[in-house]
Image (cartoon, rainbow, N blue to C red):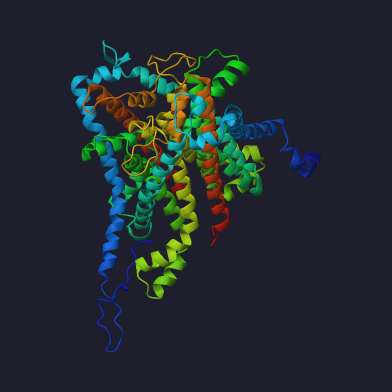
Amino acid sequence: MTTLRTTPAGAATTPPLPGAPSLTGRPRPLETVVRWILRAAAALSVVITIGIVISLLGPALAFFREVPVLDFLTGTRWAPQFADKSFGVLPLVTATAWTTFIALLVAVPFGLGAAIYLAEYARPGVRRTLKPILELLAGVPTVVFGFFALSFVAPVLLRGLLGIQVGTFSILAAGLVMGFMIIPTIASLSEDAMTAVPQALRQGSAALGANRMQTTLRVVLPAALSGIVAAVVLGISRAIGETMIVAIAAGARPQMVTDPTMEGATMTGFIARMALGDSRIGSLQYNTLFAVGLLLFVLTLAVNLVAIQLVRRFRQEY
Amino acid sequence: MTTTTTTTTTPHQRLATDGRSRERNPRSVIFLVALWLSLFIALLTLLTLIVSTFIDGAGRLDSRLFTEFPSSRPQQAGARPAILGSLWVIGTTAVLAIPLGIAAAVHLEEFADRHSRFNRFVEVNIQNLAAIPSIIYGMLAVGFLGLLGVANKNIVIGGAVALALLILPVVIISTREALRAVPRELRQGSLALGATGLQTTWRITLPAAIPGISTGTILALSRALGEAAPLLLLGALVFVSFDPNGLLSGFTTMPIQIFGWTNNPQAEFRELAAAASLLLVGILLAMNALAIVIRNRYQRRW
């Protein structure tokens, strides 16, 4: 819809015939006011983004006045609260990278498998029932997922059933549960992408003698690829930003993670833990929080922009 | 010529019998089983989560959970202030986010010039905001309160602002989709009868989009209700021993209370965490189910 106008185009150029009703609407000052209110509401989203950048940048810049950026980005020891302070963010980054990686290892195959089944195989009735149930998984709060990791996945599933030696807190348990949490995100977005592939492509493939699996793997998946990649990228963004699961189940010790059965503090986990302590506004501790927050924001922003571009591309294709 | 006859008849025969078996060769069957398994595992996770939380917490899902205040003695502890705090925060969040979100969506969908560079920027911006980690919104709220010079961060309105900003993009995106589903002809009919653009929106387009808007809004609010991370930054993990009673009142919420209990090594507190989780999951699943029912029952196909 383009702008709706009450005056028909051209009404102003042709002089009205004598006796003809005027087609120019009467001025409505209230409408102008309401239009401006609506416009302001839409512009608020830009204000929010600016607000985020400013509220992160202020304390973060104060932090970088005390700690050189290079030391922050390349240091391998994170000990902001010890007497012998050190602000190398890499331990937090490696922990985030590991949890994200494990989460994707779970969420991509299972999410994609569920999406293919729903989009290509399930009968409409089955799909109408199963899809909402799958989406319910996305409605479970992340605190509860965290509790699930701590009370079931680590002790029962990993230690009991699979015999993997993990402690109470581990990157592995947190990553796995995070993966389950992301399955609906990846499934529902990639299903949308596959449903958007025109039926004619499938019929063409079937006419050439391909069966359903061949059609799915060689025709539908390649055609929906940019949408599927966008779904995975959004999954990455959610995994990087997920806080409560790692705060509860990954542990609090910041260390370079080399093995997923270790415990570790991710960027978000550190922020959550640190926020619990009482840090005065303006103290180095407080500023540290925002420096890590800024890094988190920049990382997810980059990932999100890639996803948005990809979604736009698959929307345009068909 | 014998060769040609055989080549013309065999494929024909094979087609007749193989139409099915081509779908049933071993690789296709394994593929289908793998697809089945992935969906099954996702559903199994949901089931296991609910059952294991039920086993852990059912014993403590009693009236004390609703009537008692938190306590260092787990037998006497309850989530009363957390339940009330959640109601206060979500109520305020709804009042802030829903009108703003709908207004923004109406502007973008009905009035804004799609091709202007600014509006395209607004659109990308909203999509990005929807995918920013929730904990960042807590930092924004802290910065905002600091700007206003509010010393005490742990107030209902602070939490509500953080959650409202968090769900605003979700409300905008789902409202836009609901508005987009209303056919053009309805708007054109209204305009042809002499209604102005805003009258058309208010009396025709918005009423027609109500089911879609409510589905999106309920889902957004359920997300806010289960969210804990931004509230941690507002210092909501506190020992609240009073009923929250206003916008400036101190507060804690259900997810935060669960987080607090989870952190406690005593087994009885784990049990409390499980019981409160059951309650929270129950409420959220009910909200999600309601949203799905509204979507399936009231959404008209045009």
Give the tally of numbered discs: 0
Residue at 29 percent of width and 62 percent of height: A34
> Quadrant of the rendered structure where residue A257 is?
top left
Depicted A126 relative to depicted B267: above or below: below
Q: Is residue A14 left or right of residue A252?
A: left
Nearer to the camera, B17 or A312: A312
> Quadrant of the rendered structure where residue B45 is?
top right
Q: Is residue B74 left or right of residue A13?
A: right
Residue at 42 percent of width and 69 percent of height: B188
> Quadrant of the rendered structure where residue B33 is?
top right
Depicted A86 relative to depicted B214: above or below: above
Query: In this orientation, does residue A224 appear?
Result: no
Nearer to the camera, B272 or A222: B272
Residue at 28 percent of width and 38 percent of height: A52
Question: Residue at the top extreme?
Answer: A84
Image x and y of residue A64, in percent: 21, 23
Question: Residue at the left extreme?
Answer: A65
Query: In this orientation, does residue B72 appear?
Result: yes
Question: Residue at the right extreme?
Answer: B2
Residue at 51 percent of width and 30 percent of height: A145
Image x and y of residue A265, in percent: 40, 20
Image x and y of residue B226, in percent: 46, 38
The quarter in which the N terminus of chain B is drawn is top right
Nearer to the camera, B4 or B188: B188
Q: Is residue B126 left or right of residue B34?
A: left
Q: Is residue B143 left or right of residue A206?
A: left
